Image: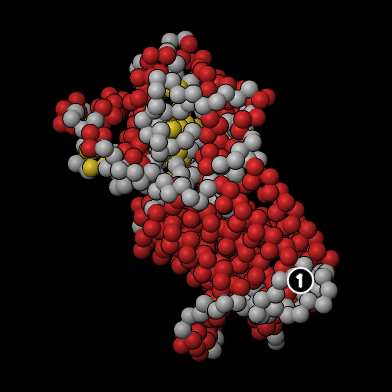
Amino acid sequence: MMNTFKVLFLGLLLSCALCTTGYAQDSTSTDDLVFTEITPATADTISKATDTTATIVKAATKAEQVQNPAKPQEQTLWGIFIAGFVGGLAALLMPCIFPMLPLTVSFFTKGAEKGRAFGKAALYGFFIILIYVVLGLLVTVIFGADALNSLSTNGIFNFFFFLLLVTFAASFFGAFELTLPSSWANKMDSNADKGGIAGLFFMAGTLALVSFSCTGPIIGTLLVQAATTGALLGPAIGMFGFSFALAIPFALFALFPSAMNKLPKSGGWLNSVKVVLGFLELAFALKFLSNVDLAYHWEWFDREIFLALWIIIFGMMGAYLLGKLKFSHDSPVNYISVPRLFMATIILAFTMYLIPGLWGAPLKSVSAFLPPQDTQDFDLYTSSLVGGSLPAKTVSGGPHKYADKFHAPLKLDAYFDYNEALEAAKQQHKPILIDFTGHACVNCRKMEANVWPDKEVYKMISKDYILVQLYVDDKSELAPEDVVTTPEGKTLGTIGKKWSDLQARKFQSNSQPFYVLLDPATETLLSPPQGADYEVANYKKFLETGLAAFQTR
């Protein structure tokens, strides 16, 4: 019967699945951008590119004052580590690893003193960590930092990741097993018989190889997510967290072997863990498909379809835990244990929580995962914001440029072109709020769902500022007259590349969301730019500071 030990791990796993993409700030590639000082002479050579390029040149000397803070990067790495650690805890409960735990620990403790057994187990754990961290570093070395950044916005890679996660889910459901060549494991196992430090290293390698059918999908998902955050060391940090969680039990149980008696016995519940993970993989895969749909403006995978699929997936997960669904490798369920009942209750309650989203409920706890609210066809929520006084979307001065491709959240009257917003701000004598955002930016969606709907924040954005949303990952081709040529001679032919270049050159940042408050007359900063901050009071203060600075000029 499952006990508290298993329930805790499954709960942590579910929590990880619901928040793993919201590490910190998302980032996108600067496409091999070289930050160079732009002189007036250089400006003359590129003056024919576009008005945007001329604007960049004008403010370039001030760009050095704007530094992208290191804190979001640190938060990203911590988030990746935690996700990897939770993934490692989940891997411990897999059928390929859990039964090996007592066998391996007994090998260390048999005929050895307590301290010596712990030393051997600790060294064994160190080699597990070493093997997986090297794997993470290899991902970075093979693909490179720029390639890792571009993964988060590349449509082909996102669609590939979607198919990859669906394959992982099918493997966990029992359709097939992902295994490495048996000759690799046999070779590693034969070297493990050598004894000594080398033997321990090959034992750790054997564990990694023979458990691949269970850990492969978890590792694959973790590497995909770590890579798409854009953090250079993301894959290595993720693998460190994963292997650290995997290695801890071997050392601890070698130090306290009597604690092994309290572990639950191996049985059919181990396969249940795999199936639950399969459902989570399937739900997570839909996010990558949504990224592709948004970036290429397919406009068929909207919020209702996404939520309907999630409701079905989590509903089936709850039914599975109640024994109403069975897979090929499942053992007979004669009764439902209390912990399993509690888990089913939590999952079914989460499923019920998702249902109002079909009518536009914001679902703030998972808003980072969902497609934008404006993709909702039947939305009873947005019009009820701000005490029911939310106006219908008005477009000042006629249709905005690119309004056929983008839709502002909360029916805000937003611009989608920097120069157009600049002219409008000058005419209306208002400061500019630049929102560097992206279709694949989960924290952008979270800010729009959790912070912008606040009554006072919404009022300032809609009435006191000219809002311009610049999508740095959009794949739409620019009109010939809008194409930008950089000082390095590189041609930027898509909307996303144009705005990514603007953000990187002018503000020396490539993270999203990135909010900038500008005086339109001088194009100077009214307040230091900032990224995602889910405290409404902090974001309100940020906007108020910009307004106060604008009014004193």
In the visual, does 392 lie left or right of 385?
left
Looking at the picture, how far across and down is residue 96, in whole percent? 62, 78
Examine the rendered structure and indicate whether residue 534 appears above or below residue 340. above
In the visual, does 220 lie left or right of 247?
left
Mark 1 belongs to which amino acid? Gly
Q: How many marks?
A: 1
Residue 23 in sight from this viewpoint: no
Looking at the picture, how far across and down is residue 542, in whole percent? 54, 25
Q: Which residue is mark 1?
A: 323
Residue, x 69% and y 60% (percent of image)?
A: 315
The residue lying toward the viewer, choosing from 359 and 96, is 359
Looking at the picture, how far across and down is residue 344, in whole percent? 76, 61
Q: Quadrant of residue 115?
A: bottom right
The residue lying toward the viewer, choosing from 465 and 541, is 465
Looking at the picture, how far across and down is residue 95, in whole percent? 65, 77
Residue, x 39% and y 48% (percent of image)?
A: 296
Q: Secondary structure at mark 1?
A: loop
